Image (spheres, helix red, strand yellow):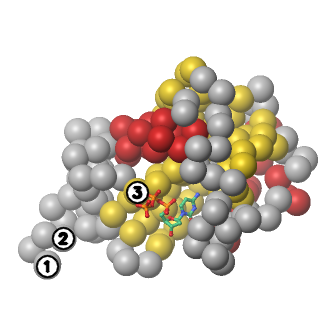
Amino acid sequence: VAQQLGHGHDGPMGTGVSDRDGRREVAAAALVDSGRLLLAQRVSPPELAGRWELPGGKIEPGETPAEGLSRELREELGIEAVVGHRVGVEVPLPNEMVLRAYAVELKSGVPVALEHAAVRWVGVDELADVDLVPNDRAWVPALVELLTRG
Ligand code: DCP
């Protein structure tokens, strides 16, 4: 295992398997359209069900984070999206995983909840009142900035 750690890459030419520290990435979308942020309501696990998240998922071996996040958004929401820059802090997860958010623009389609209970668009004034999953709360200041500067 020690030999495998550090073999991952997270750069533009990287594989997306893991980052330099050998951590698997979970990527989440800060999808902003017309000044509002898309949130999706989780159905599982029980402790997260009913709470709202930035949609996304685990990057698979061979994918860049942008490719993996685009795939997740296609699978979960039925949209085509353009993945841009990182947003906010990275959040350590159990099992050597790390959670990162990216600014995302809608290219085509209308998001529908294919794997979530619901989707909703929130404005900057609503964000503080949403029942976000605990991990995603760390991103609120950066999301406010993203929504404020348009
Ligand atoms: N997660 C989070 N905040 C997000 C997205 C994900 O805290 N905005 C967490 C929840 C899980 C882990 O990241 O602990 C993986 O997320 P998902 O279960 O949504 O990822 P996948 O869809 O890839 O999961 P699976 O492979 O189990 O289907």
The answer to the question of whether label 2 and label 3 lie on touching residues, with beta carbons closer than 8 A, is no
Residue receiving disc 1: 2
Give the residue displayed 14% in from the left and 78% down from the top.
1
Q: Amino acid at mark 1?
A: Ala
Q: Secondary structure at mark 1?
A: loop
Q: Is residue 81 left or right of residue 33?
A: left
CA neighbours of label 3 inside 10 A, class few (<14), some (14 to 19), many (20+): some
Give the residue displayed 78% in from the left and 36% down from the top.
36
Q: Position of residue 35 (x, y in %)?
A: 78, 31
Q: Amino acid at mark 3?
A: Lys
Give the residue displayed 22% in from the left and 46% down from the top.
62
On the rendered image, what quadrant is the C terminus found in? Answer: top right
Residue receiving disc 2: 5
Residue receiving disc 3: 58
Cα distance in 3D space between marks 2 and 3: 18 Å
Q: Amino acid at mark 2?
A: Leu
Q: Position of residue 123 (x, y in %)?
A: 84, 41
The answer to the question of whether label 1 and label 2 lie on touching residues, with beta carbons closer than 8 A, is yes
Q: Position of residue 16 (x, y in %)?
A: 28, 50
CA neighbours of label 2 inside 10 A, class few (<14), some (14 to 19), many (20+): few
Query: Cβ(mark 3) to ligand 1 < 8 Å?
Result: yes
